[in-house]
Image (cartoon, rainbow, N blue to C red):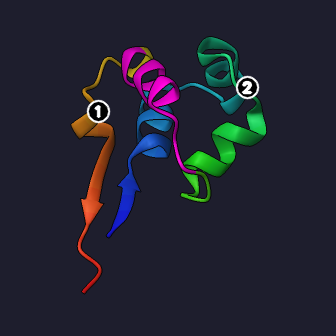
């Protein structure tokens, strides 16, 4: 199974830049970019910070995809 995320959708809907998000959740812009592209695994701490920042639940930001 893979993890699908809705991070870019949330960021664009909130009108924020990757730079703004990276500063708010205390990670690099590169980390935000790679998370949005699904290239990075998320630490629980970062996932919780992102959920808090976007006022979303973990389930709203991330979902498991069936590998079929």
Residue at the spot 27% in from the left edge and 52% down from the top edge:
63
Give the label on residue 26, or none. Answer: none
Q: Nearer the viewer, mark 1 or mark 2?
A: 1
Image location (x, y in percent) of residue 46: 52, 27
Residue at the spot 73% in from the left edge and 25% down from the top edge:
19
Mark 2 Cα within 10 Å, few/some/many (few <14, many 20+)? some
Q: Secondary structure at mark 1?
A: helix
Image location (x, y in percent) of residue 16: 57, 25
Residue at the spot 67% in from the left edge and 19% down from the top edge:
20
Q: Please, is residue 54 above or below residue 44 in the view?
A: above
Quadrant in which the C terminus is drawn: bottom left
Instruction: Tell me whether the residue at label 1 lies in contact with that at label 2, contact meaning CB atoms closer than 8 angstroms.
Output: no
Q: Is residue 18 magenta?
A: no
Q: Nearer the viewer, residue 20 or 66?
A: 66
Q: Nearer the viewer, residue 43 or 13?
A: 43
Residue at the spot 52% in from the left edge and 35% down from the top edge:
43
Provide the residue designation for mark 1. 58
The Cα–Cα distance between marks 1 and 2, rounded to whole angstroms, is 21 Å
Q: Secondary structure at mark 2?
A: helix
Q: Main secondary structure of the magenta part?
A: helix
Q: Earlier in the sequence, mark 1 or mark 2?
A: 2
Provide the residue designation for mark 2. 19
Indicate the quadrant where residue 38 lies: bottom right
Quadrant in which the N terminus is drawn: bottom left
Q: Which residues are magenta?
A: 41-52
Q: Is residue 46 magenta?
A: yes
């Amino acid at each position: 199974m893979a993890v699908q995320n809705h991070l870019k959708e949330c960021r664009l809907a909130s009108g924020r830049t990757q730079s703004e998000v990276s500063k708010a959740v205390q990670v690099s812009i590169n980390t935000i970019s790679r998370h949005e592209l699904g290239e990075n695994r998320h630490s629980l701490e970062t996932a919780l910070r992102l959920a808090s920042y976007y006022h979303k639940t973990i389930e709203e930001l991330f979902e498991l995809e069936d590998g079929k």
